[in-house]
Amino acid sequence: MFRLTPLNILLLSVCLGLAGCGGSDSSQPTTNSPTPVSAPSPDTGDSGNGNNDAGTGDNNSDDNNNETPDDNAPETDPTFATAISTSRFLQQATFGTRPQDLDALTGKSASNWFKAQLKVPPSLIMPVVSEFTPPPTAEDDFNTLYIESTSVAFWRHAIAGEDQLRQRMAFALSELLVVSNAGGEELTDIPEAVASYQDILIQHAFGNYRELLEAVTYSPAMGFYLTYMGNLKGDEVTGRMPDENYARELLQLFTIGVVALNPDGTEQKDNNGATKELYTNQDITGLARVFTGLDMDYDTSDAKEINEFALPMAVYPENHSEKSKTFLGTTIAAGTGPKASVTQALDHIFAHPNVPPFVSKQLIQRLVTSNPSPAYVARVSGAFSNGQATLPDGSTVGDGRRGDLAATLAAILFDPEARAEATERGGKIREPIVRFTQWARAFSVKNITPEYQEMLWDTRDASMLGQHPYRSPSVFNFFRPGYTAPGSLSAASGMVAPELQITNASTITGYANFMTYYITGLQQEVDVEDLQASYDEENIPLNAENAVESFLASYDAEQALAGEPDALIDRLDLLLCAGQLSATSKQEIKQILQTVPQNDEAEPLRLVHLAVLLVMTSPDYLVQK
C-alpha cells in the first residue's frame, strides 16, 4: 500500500486552510456561455433498473418538451464543445465522467443529452432490497447484507446506472429532505423504510416539488424519523400536545427557512437593517395540528403482505385534530379532515415566496457552487417559479407549473455562471461520496458489486469517507448549507464551504487511505476462505470467490502512458479535474512520479496507482470548479 508522502499530506492540508471552494462572485462571466435557462414535467417512468444506453446518446427529447427552437437561440451549444467542457459538465450533472462519455458526447448537443436523460427509466432501490431479502422460510431471517441492501443499491446505481442525471438529482434532494438510517432503530433494521424513501426522491427527481413534498409527508420513513407517525391530537385534560417536529423542520429545512428572502436568495432587511423572521412558536403549534392522525397503513400491508414501511402512511380521522390550524397568516377551518388539512397546509407553504430561492440555492450548492451569486440564484429561482427553462438549443423543459424540478435542474446546470470558467470564489468541495463514485466511473471499474465490499456498507467513519448516503447524523445533513470553516481564508472572504464541516485532519487522511485501498486494488486481495466463513456465519448468501473480481480496475489506458508522465497527468486531469490541475500541481506530481523506478513489469501499474492517488488528494481535485 502506498503511504502518503510529506508533499501530498501538505497538499491535502492546504484545502483546510485555503478552502477556495464556493460559488462565483456576482460579476458577469467573461467566457462565451450558453443562454441562461429559465413544460409537462417528464414522466418519472415505471419501476426498473434503467440499464440502457440512453444516457450517452443523442436521443430525441421527451414528447412533453417543446422541440421548436426560438428565434434567438444560439447557433451552437458550447457545453460539449471540448473534452474539458464536457467533463466539467458531467462532473456537475452525474456521479463522474467516464472516458466513453467523453468520446460519445464531445462535439454533440448537451441539450439532447439532458432531454435524453429525462427519459431514461429510473433505477430504483426497492428491487435491490428485494434481491437480498431472506425468504420467508429461512430459519434465521436476519443477515447484515439485507440490512445494508439500501447502500448496495445506492452504489450500484450511482456508479453504473444509466439514469445518471436522475440519480445525481435524487442524491442532492436527499441532502435537503433528510431521512437517515443511522439511528439503529426501525430505519436501520427495516431497509424497506429508507428504500421506499429513496425511491420517492428518485421517482420525483424530475417532477414537481409540491408533489414531492406531499409524498415525503406521507412517507413512513419521514414519519418515523421526525416523530409524527402516530401523532395524536391534543388532549386538554391530560395536557397532551401534537408533536411539532415535522412542522418545524418542514418550514425551517424543507421549504422556506427562518428569515424572509429576496428572489435572489439574499436576506430581506427591515428599516433597522435586521432580518425578518418568518414565524413564531405559535405558527409551529398551529401547523403541528395538521400532521395528526397519520400512521402506518396496516390494513393494506396485511392484505397485500407488503412491509408497512413500503407503503404511504394512512390517515386515521379519529386521531386528527379537529381544531382550527393557524400558521403563516392562514387558518385551516376547524373540523377539516386530515387529508384536506395536509393538502391545504402544503399548498399554502408551497406558495410562500421563500420557497423558490430557498430550494434553488441549496440545489445549486449541491451540484455546482457553494457561493452562487444572487443573480444566479435569481435566475434559477425564476425557473422554479415559472416551471420552465430554455435549453441552449432553444427547446424548453418544464410544464409551466411552479416547482418543476426538471426546469430547475436545467436552469442550474446551463446557467452562464455554471458554464463559465470559475472565478477564485467559484466551485465547491467535492463530497467524499462523489469522489469515490467518480474514481469508479473514470476508470471504468468492472463488476460494480458493493455486496462484496463490506467497506462500502458504511463509510461514515472518519477513517473512511466520513460520509455515507442516507446516513447523516441528524436532519441537518452531514453539513449545513451556511457553514463557514473557522480560521479559513474562505470564511475571511465571506464565503461558505458546507463540505468543510466534515473535512478535518482525521477525514483527510481517512479519505486518502480509503482511496488508496481501492485505487491500488487491495479489494482483490481478499482471503476467500475467511470471507466465505464470515458470510456463512452471518447468513449472507454469497459466493466469496466473486469478491476477487469485485470493483476491478485495470487502468489499461493509463498504463499505456506510464512512460509519458506529462500525458498521463493530462489524462487524469481531464477525467478527474476537467482540466483544472494547476501547472504547479502538475509539476509536483510529475516530480514524485519520476522517483518511481521502472525496473520490472509491475512498475507501470504502481506508477499509475500513485498518479491517481496524488491527483485525487490534491486541492485542485478536492475543489470542484
Image: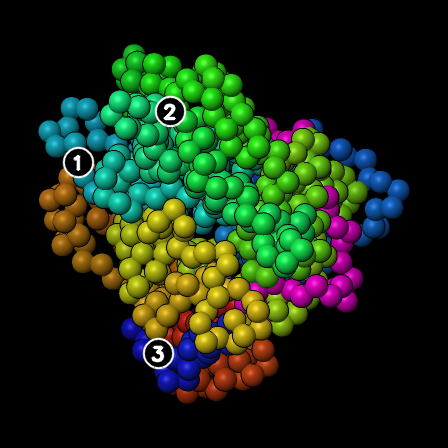
Residue 292 tag number: 2
Residue 585 in sight here: yes
Residue under numbered circle 1: 142
Residue 512 point in image, percent of width and height: 36, 70
Q: Element under label 3?
A: loop
Q: Earlier in the sequence, mark 2 or mark 1?
A: 1
The main secondary structure of the magenta stretch is: loop
Residue 4 tag number: 3
Q: Residue furthest right?
A: 71
Q: Which residues are magenta?
A: 21-44
Residue 546 tag number: none
State the quadrant of the C terminus.
bottom right
Q: Is residue 499 magenta?
A: no
Real-space CA distance between mark 2 and mark 1, rounded to the nearest whole angstrom: 33 Å
| 2 vs 1, front mark | 2
Q: Is residue 139 above or below residue 530?
A: above
- Type of amino acid under label 2: Thr
Report the side of 550 relative to 178 (left or right): left
Q: Is residue 604 above or below residue 587?
A: above
Q: Identify which residue is drawn at 55% across, 55% down.
A: 365
Q: Is residue 169 above or below residue 344?
A: below
Real-space CA distance between mark 3 and mark 2, rounded to the nearest whole angstrom: 55 Å
